[in-house]
Image: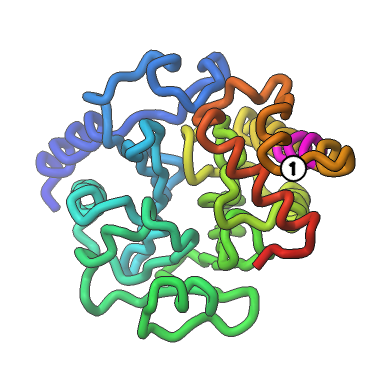
Amino acid sequence: MRPNCQSVLSVALAYLMVSVPSAAQVRTADPEKRGLSRSEFPRTIKIADNVYGYEDFHSAGMTTVSMFVVGNDGVLLADGQGSPAATQKLLDAIAKVTPKPVKWYVVASDHGDHTAGNAVLPKDITFIVTPFSRQQLKMSAPAMVGDRQVIDIGGIEVQALNLGRAHTGGDLVVYLPKQKILFMSEVYLNRVFPAMRSAYPSEWNAVLSWALQMDVTHYIPGHGFIEEPKVAREELVEYQRALRAVIAEVTRLHKLGLSVDDAIKQANWGPYQDWYIAEGQAPIAVRRIYAELNGTLE
C-alpha cells in the first residue's frame, strides 16, 4: 500500500475505534448511567494488537459483546449478535478493520442473543462448539473433542476452553495465552444480575474460580462493558461475589422450608438488588437454585 493510502487508513480507523474505558468510568451495565447513548453503538474497541471487542445493544437494553482476532490467515470471531441484521453489522465492522476473511467462529454461548444472527456468517466458516451447544443449536458441524481446542489463525494462538458448565451447559471461553486475554462470553456478565435460566449455579462459581487462577491480565465479558484490565479483574471478582451471594441467599430461604414463590418474595439481594435486569432475573435465579438444591436440575 502506498504511504499516503496507509495514512488515510490510519485516520479512518482512529474514528472507527474507541479506547478501553478508564478506571474512572462509572461501574454499571446501564449505558445511560455510563453517559452513553444508543447512537454511539455498535462500537469496536481495540483490546490489543489484532484483538478487538465489539459492543452492540441487546434487546434488554444492555450490550452484547463479541470479540474478534485478526491473524495472518484470517479472522476468528467469538460469539455473534442477536439477529442477522446485528451480526451483519458486526461483520461489516470487522471488514473496516481488515479485508481478511472471517474463517473461524467460536460458539462461546449458544443463547440466541449471541447466535440468532449466525445465518449471515460465511458459508465455509469453521465452527468451534461443544457437543452440548451443537445439540442445542442443531448444528451439523463437528463438535470439540475434549475440553481444549487450539486454533492457529496465523501468528496468533487461540485456545477454546471448556472450563465447565456455567451460564449454559456448553460454555466456552476464548484464551489468547501470549496476549493474556480471556473472552468469557456469558460466564462473565459485567454488573448484570446473575442470569440463570439455563445455568448450573454451583458449577458456575467453580468456573469463575478457575478463570481467576489463570494467567490472564484482561478479562472480557459477554454482557455489560469492556473495561480496562485492572477494573475488568476487579469486576470479575465482584461478579463472583454476586453469584455467591445469590446462591447463599436462596440456600438460606430453602433451608427455612419456604416455597419457591415465597422465597422470591422474601429474597434480600443486598447490594446486588440494583444490578442491571435484577427485577426480571432474580425470580429465575431463585427457581434455578431451588432446582439444584432439590436435585432436579437438568
Residue 157 x %, y %? 52, 67
**Mark 1: amino acid:** Ser
Q: Does the magenta-highlighted stretch encompass residue 230?
A: no
Most frequent secondary structure within the magenta stretch: helix
| 147 with respect to 292 (left or right) | left
Q: Which residues are magenta?
A: 243-250
Question: Going 55% across and 67% down the picture, which residue do you hit?
Answer: 160
Question: Going 73% across and 24% down the picture, which residue do you hit?
Answer: 268
Question: Going 56% across and 67% down the picture, which residue do you hit?
Answer: 170
In the depicted structure, whether residue 174 falls above or below residue 64: below
- Crowdedness of circle 1 by 10 Å Cα count: few (<14), some, many (20+)? few
In the depicted structure, whether residue 269 falls above or below residue 286: above
Residue 225 x %, y %? 47, 33
Residue 130 x %, y %? 53, 74
Name of the residue lying farthest toward the right: 255
In the depicted structure, whether residue 128 falls above or below residue 91: below
Question: Which image quadrant: the C terminus?
Answer: bottom right
Kindly identify which residue carries mark 1: 259
Residue 165 x %, y %? 66, 63
Q: Does the magenta-highlighted stretch encompass residue 247?
A: yes
